[in-house]
Image (cartoon, rainbow, N blue to C red):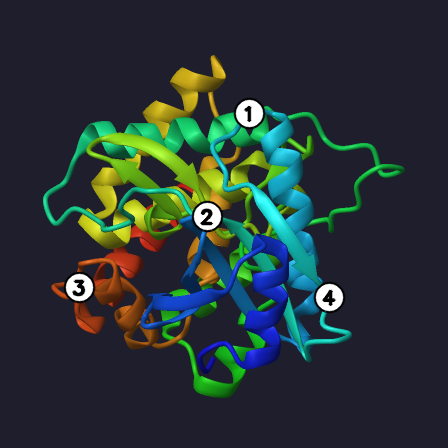
C-alpha cells in the first residue's frame, strides 16, 4: 500500500484537529502508518486499506471498541471512514508505545502470557447482535481462502493429511465466544515481558476459544519449536481456570491457516526481528507441530 495521499491525510488532520505528517510505516515499511499532528503533539496510527477490504476494517473497529469495553489493552479508535469520500477504508487509532519484536531466545513467561491473553479474550462477553455485529468464525484469518491456496500452489503431504483429518473431525466443545482471529506475537506490543497492547483486530468475530489458543500455540511452535506450545497452553489454562478442550483439533486448524510455501511468511517474521526463521526451518517446525497434533487427533 503506497503512502497516504492528500485526501487521506486531510481526513486524518480533521480528526486530529491539526496538520499531520507521516513518520513511517509500521508493517514492513507500509500500512499502518505512524503519523503526527502539529500543534497538539499527538501521534496516531493510520490504517489505509483498499475498498475491497472495507468490511474487514469495519470489523476491526467494532472489535476494538468491544474489546475496550472489557478493559482489554487495545488502541483507542479515534476515527473510521468506510471510504465513500477517500477511496480507501481508513481507521485512525491512538499510538501505543511498545515493541512487537519476537525474542530470538525462548521466553516461557511471554509464551504463558500469550496463552493467558487468548483466554482473556475468550472470556469477554459475546456482544448482543442488536448492538454489535461481528462475523462468525471457524478458524484463524478466515478472510483468506487457505484451501484455495493449497489447491493453486500445491500442498505438502502433511497439509493434505491435515485437511482430510479436519474434514472428518468435529470439536467436542461447541461453545463460542469473542475471538481475535489472528493472535500471534506480531500482533501484540510489549514492555519487556509485560504485554501492553493487542493489535490488528480485522479477523475478529465470534467463534471457539480454540481459534486463538491454536493460533498462539502454532506461532510458538514456528518461533521456537513444537515443545514451546505447551507453555502457551499452561498460560491459557491458568487464566481460564479449566482444561482447554479440543487442543489437537484447533492446533490442526491453526496450522492449516498458513501458506503452502512458508517462505511467504518470512518477510513478516523478519520484520518482527526473526530473520533467522528460514522457510526450511518454518516448514520443518510446522510439519512437526502438525504431526504431533494429528497423532493425537487421529487416536
Of badges 2 and 4, the one in the foreground is: 2
Q: Residue furthest right?
A: 130
Of the numbered discs 3 and 1, the one sitting upstream in the chain is: 1
Task: Say left or right for 155 vs 53.
Answer: left
SS for dot 2: loop
Of badges 3 and 1, the one in the foreground is: 1
For the residue pair 233 and 74, the one nearer the viewer reads as 74
Residue 26, horizontal then vertical, whole percent: 35, 63
Residue 54, horizontal then vertical, whole percent: 69, 68
- Name the disc covering residue 119, or none: none
Of the numbered discs 4 and 1, the one sitting upstream in the chain is: 1
SS for dot 3: loop
- Name the disc covering residue 277, or none: 3
Marks 3 and 4, how far apart at CA: 37 Å
Assess disc 3: are there few (<14), some (14-19) or many (≥20) residues with their C-alpha within 10 Å of its C-alpha.
many
Marks 1 and 2, how far apart at CA: 26 Å
Task: Say left or right for 82 vs 29.
Answer: right
SS for dot 1: loop
Q: Residue at x 54, y 31 (%)?
A: 121
Marks 2 and 4, how far apart at CA: 26 Å
Q: Quadrant of the C terminus?
A: top left
- Name the disc covering residue 40, or none: 2
Q: Which residue is mark 4?
A: 82
Marks 3 and 2, how far apart at CA: 41 Å
Of badges 3 and 2, the one in the foreground is: 2
Residue 85, horizontal then vertical, whole percent: 75, 76
Q: Residue furthest top?
A: 241
Image-quadrant location for residue 239: top left
Compared with residue 175, is residue 186 higher up or lower down, i.e. above or below?
below
Task: Say left or right for 45 vs 108.
Answer: right
Amino acid at each position: 500500500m503506497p503512502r497516504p495521499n492528500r485526501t487521506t491525510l486531510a481526513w486524518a488532520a480533521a480528526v486530529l484537529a491539526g496538520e499531520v505528517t507521516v513518520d513511517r510505516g509500521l508493517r514492513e515499511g507500509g500500512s499502518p502508518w505512524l503519523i503526527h499532528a502539529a500543534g497538539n503533539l499527538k501521534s496516531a496510527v493510520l490504517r489505509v486499506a483498499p475498498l475491497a477490504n472495507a468490511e474487514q476494517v469495519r470489523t476491526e473497529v467494532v472489535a476494538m471498541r468491544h474489546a475496550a469495553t472489557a478493559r482489554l489493552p487495545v488502541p483507542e479508535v479515534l476515527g473510521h471512514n468506510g471510504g465513500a469520500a477517500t477511496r480507501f477504508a481508513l481507521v485512525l487509532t491512538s499510538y501505543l508505545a511498545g515493541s512487537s519484536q519476537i525474542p530470538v531466545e525462548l521466553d516461557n513467561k511471554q509464551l504463558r502470557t500469550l496463552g493467558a491473553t487468548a483466554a482473556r479474550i475468550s472470556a469477554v462477553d459475546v456482544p448482543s447482535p442488536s448492538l454489535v455485529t461481528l462475523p462468525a468464525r471457524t478458524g484463524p484469518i478466515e478472510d483468506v481462502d487457505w484451501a484455495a491456496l493449497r489447491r493453486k500452489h500445491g500442498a505438502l503431504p502433511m497439509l493434505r493429511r491435515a485437511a482430510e483429518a479436519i474434514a472428518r473431525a468435529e470439536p467436542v466443545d461447541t461453545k463460542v465466544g469473542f475471538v481475535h482471529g489472528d493472535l500471534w506475537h506480531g500482533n501484540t506490543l510489549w514492555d519487556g515481558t509485560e504485554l501492553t497492547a493487542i493489535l490488528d483486530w480485522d479477523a475478529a468475530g465470534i467463534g471457539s476459544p480454540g481459534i486463538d489458543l491454536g493460533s498462539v500455540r502454532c506461532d510458538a511452535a514456528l518461533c521456537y519449536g513444537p515443545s514451546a506450545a505447551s507453555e502457551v497452553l499452561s498460560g491459557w489454562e491458568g487464566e481460564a481456570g479449566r482444561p482447554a478442550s479440543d487442543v489437537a483439533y484447533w492446533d490442526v486448524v491453526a496450522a492449516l491457516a498458513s501458506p503452502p510455501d512458508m517462505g511467504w511468511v518470512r518477510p513478516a517474521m523478519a520484520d518482527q526481528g526473526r530473520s533467522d526463521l528460514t522457510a526450511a526451518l518454518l516448514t520443518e517446525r510446522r510439519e512437526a507441530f502438525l504431526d504431533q497434533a494429528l497423532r493425537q487427533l487421529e487416536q
